[in-house]
Amino acid sequence: MDLRWGHRLTGLADGGDGGDGGDGGDGVDLACETEDGPAQIHARYVVGTDGAHSSVRHLLGVEFPGHSHRDLFLICDIRADLPFPNERRFFFDPPWNPGRQVLIHPQPDGVWRIDWQIPPETDIEAERANGGLERRIRAVVGERAEYELVWMTVYRFHQRIADRFRVGSAFLAGDAAHLYSPFGARGLNSGAPDAENLAWKLALVLRGEASDALLDTYEPERRAAAAENLAVTDATMRFMVPHGPWRRFVRTLILRGSERIGALRRRVNSGRLAEPFAYAGSPIVEPGPEDPALPRHGAVAPDVVLSDGSRLETRLGSGFVVLVAKASPAAVGAVGALAWPLPVEVVADDALGAVYAPSSPRAWVVRPDGHLASSLALDEGSAGSLPVLVARAAGAGQ
């Protein structure tokens, strides 16, 4: 591995084919500035994970449409012994932050995080000097509580998604590709799956086990996930910061009625926690079975405690895995004797049956990122189709 520090990217020349298939062209030439002068780097592929102001995205000429929220948000982490319940609490329009919101939740080691929505013109450094910040904190913790300010920051959130996630031999991931409101923890929980999704595909291509066309599936899978996150966080912000008197009136009715009516309580939106995206509709995910008792194709494989006490999730992540559930010894033997198009681990365990084969024997293809690519009803005659399903999940025919 070649690690290079102190390199600032200033130029990018892509020799790829535009992301429409092929072998990715001649790779990417990167121009960098260093303390020792200009440096040139040639790479077969480049992944821009350089944040909201991504140089890679700018150099690729990829648009980043969306909007920025007008108000600021102030976070203070304080260490204090407070008589608060050990749970996340959201205050809509409290008297000590009128017209805006405050979020309070516990963290490890006696730390509490307080998150205020504040006006855009707020000068927080001036507040630190004139006692305004102290008054904000005291309004939450009380006049007598002793506290230590551990950390503070001010941020403005954005709702944006890049027009493209792949351009030739270059890719965008994380904040370089998408930005959301932080409510629901959808930043890190979408950046990490970007990396998981792209890493196994790059590994197969670089090892010669798949064609460059497999990389074309990164954008439709992860951009769809980003679009879903954007829709969810937009809905949260429309509830948290309603625009216009009618929307504020409706939100007030929901909040007041939620104390007595369960249907209204479910409409209170302070941030839906992130969940793994299911790649239904992906070009490398087969249409799923209609049986609602079975896991969805494209979803993360449900974890199971195996017969030896280990967890299924510990067997996933290093390559393709084929799960064999509730099959006869003959069917298991037929699967084990198959010739695979690339390295595959077969996991046959009786404990899989309750989740993966509740009514009849079934085999499942699990991708290296833990998502279910396909499945089939299993017997000795059908087992021969599994290598074809693995090949499709690795991009064959794309």
Image (cartoon, rainbow, N blue to C red):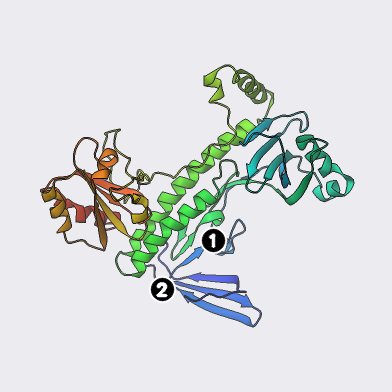
Q: Nearer the viewer, residue 177 or 377?
A: 377
Of the residues shown, which amino acid type is indicated by label 1? Thr
Can see residue 241?
no
Could you tell me residue 28's position as x and y percent? 47, 71
Image position of 167 (left or right of 281): right
- Which residue is labeled 2 in the image? 26
Specify the quadrant of the image occupied by residue 319.
bottom left
Please tell me the numbered disc located at residue 180.
none
Residue 323: % across, % down: 25, 50
Query: Hey, which residue is sitting farthest right in the picture?
Result: 130
Relative to 73, say whether 174 is above or below: below
User: How many residues crowd around disc 2 within 10 Å: few (fewer than 14), some, or many (20 or more)?
Assistant: some
Q: Are marks 1 and 2 in contact (CB under 8 Å)?
A: no
Name the front one of labels 1 and 2.
1
Residues 65 and 343: in front is: 343
Residue that carries the numbered disc 1 in the rendered image: 49
Q: Where is residue 369 in the image (x, y as percent from the top left)?
A: 38, 54
